[in-house]
Image: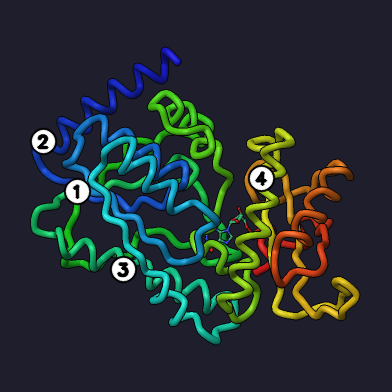
């Protein structure tokens, strides 16, 4: 905590010196890194920071609401909330190929952010980013991971990256010290394309909703079991085929929900934890009882390699 306080003081001064009375723009996803950078900048320059949160409709249950609650209501930040749900979902309509979905989501994200940047463009000279040290080192050739890097040349910003020399666990300590809620600081990694790569094949709104609800049940039960921050990543995937079941004596023909939980150090290899049987049964019972459209629950036992962490 002492070191964290010193780091925060140092960065606050450095940010003030770098930015002066200029404005700074930040894409705030709600992830650990962008949230901590936002909190740091709010402490340093208050409303000179303009946070843009793009809701692409592929967030987990309650996440966009939490961003608004924490940053607008609690920290009194200058937050632009963009409801882009219909834009993303119409573009994705009928698109089944995973990398095509990723490209559409990544490109549209930049387009939406760029539109917001143009609206405030004249007043803003800095772009803040939640770059951390592993981002600088990392190169993963397997999937096209996206971030906000591809802004057009005529939008010229100087970068402000106050946590770029920190590792993830250090970023979490800073976030905690800055008063961010534990659920935000301990948030598990979440891919940029979000639930879009977990609603397998061509996304439909009803199946996306079933996925979001089932995933919320899983996260709730993991938190209740004290596994938040202990299992590296855990989520639900819903495939685009149906299975037969029987509900109240009547044939049901609904989607399966596939639970995935992994432990890893660097996401390059991963192991599946031996979850408590009672926990798995409780999650299964709750999903079957509470989530419309799901009639079967599976636990994916595949390590990486050969299976990647995400199904798409
Ligand atoms: P895979 O599925 O490649 O995932 O084993 C490794 C880690 O990366 C995350 N992931 C992504 N993150 N954009 C992201 O920002 C993506 O397109 C993407 N695909 C996978 C995945 O959640 C896991 O943590």
Q: Distance between the residues labelled 4 and 1?
A: 38 Å
Of the two numbered discs 2 and 4 on the same chain, state the one appearing first in sequence.
Answer: 2
Marks 2 and 3, how far apart in space?
27 Å
Quadrant containing the N terminus in the rendered view: top left
Tag 2 residue = 20
> Does any atom of ligand 1 lie closer than 8 Å to the CB of label 1?
no
Location of residue 35 with respect to 305 vertically, above or below? above
Which of 293 and 241 lies nearest the eye of the viewer?
A: 293
Residue 118's x, y, as percent? 17, 65
Measured from the top left, where is residue 43 in percent x and y?
A: 26, 30
Label 4 or label 1, whichever lies nearer to me, is: 4
Q: Mark 1 or 2 closer to N-term?
A: 2
Cα separation, mark 3 vs mark 1, equals 18 Å
Residues at badges 4 and 3 in contact (C-beta under 8 Å)?
A: no
Res 236 quadrant in image: bottom right
Q: Residue sitting at 53 percent across and 38 percent down? A: 183
Q: What element carries label 2?
A: loop
* Image position, residue 5 (x, y; %): 37, 18
Q: Which of marks 4 and 1 is nearer the N terminus?
A: 1
Circles 2 and 3, Cβ within 8 Å, touching? The answer is no
Labelled disc at residue 179: none
Within-10-Å neighbours for mark 2: few <14, some 14–19, many 20+? few
Disc 3 residue: CB within 8 Å of ligand 1:
no
Give the residue displayed 75% in from the left and 74% down from the top. 255
Residue indicated by mark 1: 126
Q: Is mark 4 on a helix, strand or loop?
A: helix
Asked if residue 39 lies left or right of residue 269, the reply is: left
Q: Decide if residue 265 is on the left or right side of residue 253.
A: left
């Amino acid at each position: 905590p002492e070191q964290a306080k010193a780091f925060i003081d140092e960065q606050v001064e450095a940010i003030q010196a770098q930015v002066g009375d200029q404005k700074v723009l930040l894409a705030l996803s709600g992830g650990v890194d962008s949230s901590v950078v936002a909190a740091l900048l709010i402490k340093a320059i208050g409303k000179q920071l303009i946070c843009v949160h793009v809701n692409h409709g592929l967030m987990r249950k309650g996440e966009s609401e939490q961003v608004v609650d924490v940053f607008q209501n609690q920290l009194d930040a200058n937050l632009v909330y963009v409801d882009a749900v219909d834009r993303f979902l119409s573009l994705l309509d009928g698109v089944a190929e995973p990398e095509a979905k990723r490209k559409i989501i990544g490109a549209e994200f930049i387009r939406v952010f760029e539109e917001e940047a143009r609206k405030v463009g004249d007043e803003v000279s800095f772009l803040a980013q939640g770059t951390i040290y592993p981002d600088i080192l990392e190169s993963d050739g397997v999937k096209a991971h996206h971030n906000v890097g591809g802004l057009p040349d005529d939008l010229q910003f100087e970068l402000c990256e106050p946590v770029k020399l920190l590792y993830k666990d250090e970023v979490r300590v800073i976030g905690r010290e800055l008063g961010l809620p534990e659920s935000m600081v301990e948030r598990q990694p979440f891919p940029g394309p979000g639930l879009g790569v977990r609603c397998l094949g061509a996304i439909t709104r009803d199946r996306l909703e079933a996925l979001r609800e089932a995933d919320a049940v899983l996260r709730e039960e993991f938190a209740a079991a004290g596994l938040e921050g202990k299992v590296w990543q855990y989520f639900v995937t819903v495939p685009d085929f149906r299975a037969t079941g029987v509900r109240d004596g009547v044939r049901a023909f609904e989607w399966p929900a596939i639970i995935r939980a992994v432990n890893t150090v660097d996401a390059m290899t991963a192991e599946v934890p031996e979850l408590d049987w009672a926990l798995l049964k409780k999650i299964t019972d709750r999903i079957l009882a509470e989530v419309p459209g799901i009639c079967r629950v599976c636990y994916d036992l595949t390590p990486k390699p050969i299976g990647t962490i995400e199904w798409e």
